[in-house]
Amino acid sequence: MLRTRVLGQSERQPGQPVLKASLDLAARLPRLVLEARRVSASVHGIHGRRRSGPGETFWQYRPLVTGESASRIDWRRSARDGHLFVREREWEASHAIWLWIDRSPSMGFSSSLSQVSKVDRALIAGFALAETLVEGGERVGHIGLTRPMASRRIVEMLAQAILADRRNGEADLPPDEPLPRLADAIMITDGLTPAAALAKRIATLASSGARGHILLIADPIEETFPFSGQAELFDLEDGLTLRVGDAGKWGEDYRERLQAHRDAIREACRHAGWTLTLHRTDRPASEGVLRIASLIAASRGGPAG
């Protein structure tokens, strides 16, 4: 029942396509990528973990320290001014940050109170987080779609992978397998799958010790249910309809059940050591992005933003 949407004048009517994701996502992606970059540029104070250590990416030259092996000397650089220099590489730990962006049918909903669908907000937030984190020195991948990457083209690469994906567009949960032990996960979803199923998937992802953060996307109408009189509800996932005689009274019960559902998700996150952040689509995307980026920076020992 928690997947049910009320039909207002601006909401989807029966018989209309649910999301038309495969038809119009390609047309929307350029705008979403530009908006994600604008959001990422507005997020300040998030720094990554750039430091020296074993890896493949050149970081800096530094003077040779007494006692170090001569095999570490970069003779070409040292020959420039007669001093001995060591070529350091950027530290690359085995952990990475794994995104998962919910693109299931329920994410296609938008009301007159928001004017942006949940899936578009989720994609903007996910792309913005990816760019912010890569600029901070992290590697980011999408669960089930890409490997972790530190490319400056991370947004375009994620967008292309999502556009080409024909298998997971309807899934309302990430793949059912543990993440690497040192990984971080970011799930961006509306959470409108049964709480028990979501809790089980969180437990699986975290079973190896991976940390995680859930960004819960909600339309303001889903939060407030501001209706009275007769109403017809339509389930975007299953195509079912429900006629409600007294929407005001039904709304009271709905809000109680939604709170209980959210409490169950929050408890699952607490048990796994994960965080839960609620983000409404009538609020700026930068708020959710800054919150998640700050949590990750804090977990890395950096400034909280």
Image (tube, helix red, strand yellow):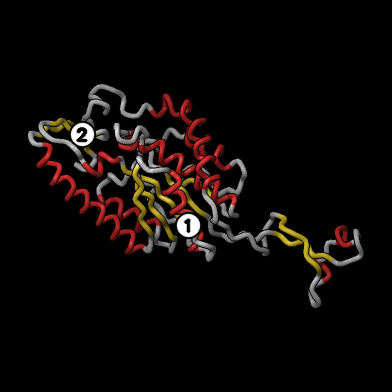
Closer-to-camera residue (95/31): 31
User: Dot 2, how many residues are within 10 Å of its Cα: few (below 14), some (14-19), or many (20+)?
Assistant: many
Mark 1 highlights which residue?
Answer: 294
Closer-to-camera residue (128/84): 128
Q: What is the x, y in percent for residue 262?
A: 26, 53
Give the amino acid at mark 1.
Ser
Q: What is the x, y in percent for residue 63?
A: 80, 68
Q: Which residue sits at x=37%, y=26%?
A: 20
The tag on residue 6 is 2
The answer to whether residue 284 is left or right of residue 229 is right
User: Dot 1, how many residues are within 10 Å of its Cα: few (below 14), some (14-19), or many (20+)?
Assistant: many
Marks 2/1: CA distance?
Answer: 35 Å
Q: Earlier in the sequence, mark 2 or mark 1?
A: 2
Closer-to-camera residue (241/228): 228
Q: Which residue sits at x=13%, y=46%?
A: 253
- At mark 2, the secondary structure is strand
The tag on residue 247 is none
Q: Are marks 2 and 1 in contact (CB under 8 Å)?
A: no
Q: Which residue sits at x=61%, y=45%?
A: 151
- At mark 1, the secondary structure is helix
Q: Quadrant of the N terminus?
A: top left
Q: What is the x, y in percent for residue 234?
A: 20, 32
Taking the view exactly as shown, the residue that stands out farthest to the top is 15
Q: Which residue sits at x=79%, y=73%?
A: 65
Q: In this view, does 102 lie above or below 69?
A: above
Taking the view exactly as shown, the residue that stands out farthest to the bottom is 67
Give the amino acid at mark 2.
Val
Q: What is the x, y in percent for residue 43?
A: 52, 49
How many marks can you see?
2
* Residue 249 occupies quadrant: top left
